[in-house]
Image: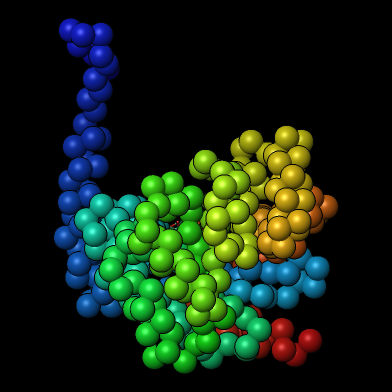
C-alpha cells in the first residue's frame, strides 16, 4: 500500500491483475458453458427438524470446467450478475430444476435462488410461470429465495414481480437473513413464508451465546408472523440441537447432506418412502 498525495491509500497487488484476467475469462467462457453442457444443477435437502424428513431441495448451480475443474457459484455468479448473463443463466436453471422437481413426490418443494437482475427483467414473472407450466410443476411447489439486497432498492417492478407470482401460488423465502439490513419492514411488506438464517449464525466463526439468542429472537418473530425459520449451514449434531432449541423448524447443511446430483436426490427420496 502506498499513500497518495491527498491522504488516500491506494493498493496495488499483482493478484488484482490476475483477478481481472480471470473474470474476463469467466465472462467469455460462461457464455458457452450452457451449450457445452458444462453446467449442472445440484440439489441440497432442507429437512424437517422434527421428523428428519426432506421437505424441500434447494437448486444450486455447478460448473464443471474442462480445465479449471469444478467452479463454485461464488466465483461465477457475481460475474454473471455484472455482465447480465445471469438472466439467461437463471432462466435455464429454473427451467431445468423445475423439470427435475416435477418427478418428486407432491409434498417436496423446489427452492431456486434469484438474482436482483432477474427480477427486474420485464416479463420475468410470466417467464417463470411459463417454465413451470412447461415442466408440469405446480406453482405452489416453487419457492424463490431472494436476499434483502433485492429489496433494498426495490421499485415497482420488484413489487409487481412478487405480487404476480405469489398470486399464482409461488412462495418466497428471505435468504441469508442477518447478513444484510435485516429490516423488519421487508417482512411486513412482502409475503415471505420462510426466513433462512444465515450460516454465519449457525456454524460460522461468530457462533456463541449471542448468535443463539439472535436465532431465538428471529424464530419467535417468525412464529408470530407465521413464517418458518430455516437454519442454514448445519454441520454437527450439536448445531441441530442448538437451532431446534432456538425454535427453528427446518434445517439445511452438510450434517444432513451436501448438494447432490439429481439422481442422488431421487435416491434420498426413494429411501425415505421405504421407512
Ligand atoms: P446460498 O443461497 O446461501 O446457498 C447455500 C450455500 O451454502 C451453498 O453453496 C451450499 O453448498 C453451502 N452450504 C450448505 N450447507 C453448508 C454447510 O453445512 N456448511 C458450509 N460451509 N456450507 C454449506 P454454493 O452452492 O457454493 O452456493 C453459493 C451461493 O451461490 C449461494 O448461496 C447462492 O447465493 C449462489 N447460487 C448458487 N446457485 C445459484 C443459482 O442457481 N442462481 C443464483 N442466482 N445464485 C446461485
Ligand atoms: Ca439460497
Ligand atoms: Ca443462504
Ligand atoms: Ca449466500
Measuring 53% from the left and 91% from the top, which residue is drawn there?
Answer: 103
Measuring 73% from the left and 35% from the top, which residue is drawn there?
Answer: 210
Q: Position of residue 86 (x, y in %)?
A: 30, 63
Q: Can see residue 243?
A: no
Q: How is the image coloured?
A: rainbow
Measuring 57% from the left and 63% from the top, which residue is drawn there?
Answer: 191
Q: Nearer the viewer, residue 144 or 167?
A: 167
Q: Nearer the viewer, residue 253 or 91?
A: 91
Q: Can see residue 35?
A: yes
Q: Nearer the viewer, residue 226 or 145?
A: 226
Q: Is residue 111 above or below residue 135?
A: above
Q: Is residue 162 above or below residue 83?
A: below
Image quadrant in which you'd find residue 195: bottom right
Instruction: Answer with left or right where residue 211 lies relative to residue 38.
Output: right
Instruction: Answer with left or right where residue 97 lies relative to residue 78.
Output: right
Instruction: Answer with left or right where residue 14 lies relative to residue 204.
Output: left
Quarter of the picture containing the C terminus is bottom right
Q: Position of residue 81 (x, y in %)?
A: 29, 56
Q: Position of residue 1 (x, y in %)?
A: 27, 17
Q: Position of residue 109 (x, y in %)?
A: 59, 78
Image quadrant in which you'd find residue 208: top right
Image quadrant in which you'd find residue 76: bottom left
Measuring 66% from the left and 84% from the top, which residue is drawn there?
Answer: 107
Q: Is residue 60 above or below residue 220?
A: below
Amino acid at each position: 500500500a502506498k499513500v497518495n498525495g491527498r491522504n488516500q491509500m491506494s493498493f496495488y497487488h499483482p493478484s488484482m491483475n490476475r483477478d481481472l484476467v480471470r473474470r474476463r475469462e469467466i465472462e467469455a467462457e460462461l457464455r458457452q458453458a450452457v451449450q457445452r453442457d458444462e453446467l449442472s444443477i445440484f440439489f441440497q435437502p432442507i429437512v424437517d427438524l422434527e421428523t428428519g424428513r426432506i421437505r424441500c431441495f434447494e437448486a444450486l448451480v455447478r460448473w464443471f470446467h474442462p480445465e479449471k475443474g469444478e467452479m463454485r457459484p461464488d466465483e461465477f455468479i457475481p460475474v454473471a450478475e455484472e455482465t447480465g448473463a445471469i438472466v439467461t443463466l437463471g432462466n435455464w436453471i429454473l427451467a431445468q430444476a423445475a423439470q427435475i422437481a416435477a418427478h418428486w413426490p407432491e409434498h417436496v418443494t423446489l427452492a431456486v435462488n434469484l438474482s436482483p437482475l432477474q427480477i427486474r427483467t420485464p416479463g420475468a414473472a410470466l417467464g417463470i410461470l411459463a417454465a413451470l407450466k412447461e415442466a408440469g410443476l405446480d406453482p405452489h411447489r416453487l419457492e424463490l429465495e431472494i436476499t434483502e439486497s433485492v429489496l433494498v432498492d426495490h421499485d415497482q417492478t420488484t413489487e409487481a414481480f412478487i405480487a404476480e407470482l405469489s398470486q399464482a401460488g409461488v412462495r418466497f423465502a428471505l435468504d441469508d437473513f442477518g447478513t444484510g439490513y435485516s429490516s423488519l419492514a421487508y417482512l411486513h411488506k412482502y409475503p415471505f413464508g420462510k426466513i433462512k438464517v444465515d450460516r454465519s449464525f449457525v456454524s460460522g466463526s461468530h457462533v456463541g451465546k449471542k448468535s443463539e439468542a439472535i436465532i431465538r429472537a428471529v424464530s419467535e418473530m417468525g412464529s408470530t408472523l407465521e413464517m418458518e425459520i430455516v437454519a442454514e449451514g448445519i454441520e454437527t449434531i450439536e448445531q441441530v440441537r442448538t437451532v431446534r432449541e432456538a425454535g427453528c423448524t427446518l434445517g439445511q447443511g452438510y450434517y444432513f447432506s451436501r448438494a447432490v446430483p439429481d439422481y442422488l436426490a431421487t435416491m434420498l427420496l426413494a429411501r425415505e418412502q421405504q421407512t
